[in-house]
Amino acid sequence: MLEYAPKGLVGVLTPQANTTVEAEFSILKPPSIGLITSRLTSKKPTINSRLIEYINQIDNNLEEFANAPLKTVLFACTGASYFFESTEEKEYLKKISSRRGYPIISATTAISDALNVIKPKKIGIISPYNDELHNKAMSYWKKIPYNIKVIKRLKQKKNNFHPIYTIQTSTTKNCLYEIESENCDLILFLGTGLPTLPAILDNKSNLIVISANLCLIWRTCLIIENQKPSQKNLEEWYTGIKWRNRFFSLVSR
């Protein structure tokens, strides 16, 4: 047992400039679970080419964890998965998991697990991506066996930094308010780089609101606690029961 990870140690793979994953994971995860992070790096010139390299280099990145006693590894990069078919991604990760001896959970598979236990009738998707990646994402998600009723895109500011990471809470909240009237029963925030926790906690409607990072930590805790996904244990996460106090404790400092 590790001093700062008595329930287990979790590896995280996240893109080189992602400023959101570690911040949100530190709020979402119980203190008894420890995290170590390896950054996915690439010198490719475009976002899309970097994403492809990220997913192709997963096995190499896992070497950075050496012999750390990992319970699971989280591939916290939603965008890279859109360059795979869902079944191809699962088989690819399954092969690496079998070789490494621990499960590897991607953001897209964690989201899919959440959708499969909720079984929503009408989904609203909030997308933070540029045009090309947005189209790849919609092609991916439209293949799920659930009705996507509405898609909203977040406005990005043009700057030298990755635009997803600079989207403000006010923008995500406003987009959530706009979609509330669309008669959906679930809202999905895409992108592990998108800050979403304030908007999820601010949700005062009857809508279920989930995000990539929330789904990843939910699945992590189930693996460590040897539980199967269910709507009941997911509800504790999307209502904030599992992490609300940590959020206000850390954010109010």
Image (cartoon, helix red, strand yellow):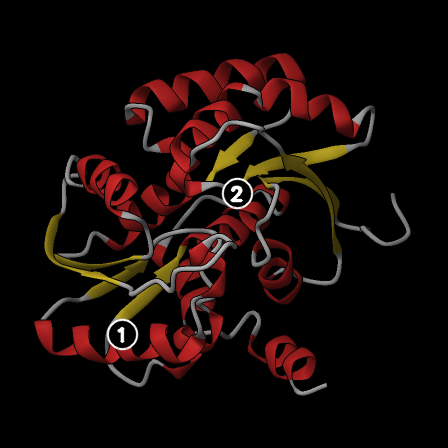
Label 1 environment density (alpha carbons within 10 Å; few <14, some 14–19, many ≥20): many
Residue 106 placed where, x, y %?
A: 47, 36
- Residue that mark 1 sits on: 176
Q: CA distance from mark 1 to mark 2?
A: 23 Å
Which disc is residue 140 wearing?
none
Say what secondary structure mark 2 lies in.
loop
Residue 133 placed where, x, y %?
A: 29, 40
The amino acid type of the residue labelled 1 equals Leu
Residue positioned 42% across, 47% down in the render: 229
| Left or right side of 246 for 128 | left
Label 2 environment density (alpha carbons within 10 Å; few <14, some 14–19, many ≥20): many
- Residue that mark 2 sits on: 76
Out of 158 and 244, give the one closest to the viewer: 158
Residue positioned 34% across, 18% down in the render: 88
Examine the rendering and report whether any part of residue 72 can be seen: yes
Residue positioned 38% across, 23% down in the render: 89
The number of callouts visible is 2
Query: Residue 1: which quarter of the image?
Result: top right
Say what secondary structure mark 1 lies in.
helix
| Left or right side of 52 for 223 | right
Residue 74 placed where, x, y %?
A: 57, 39
Residue positioned 48% across, 70% down in the render: 197
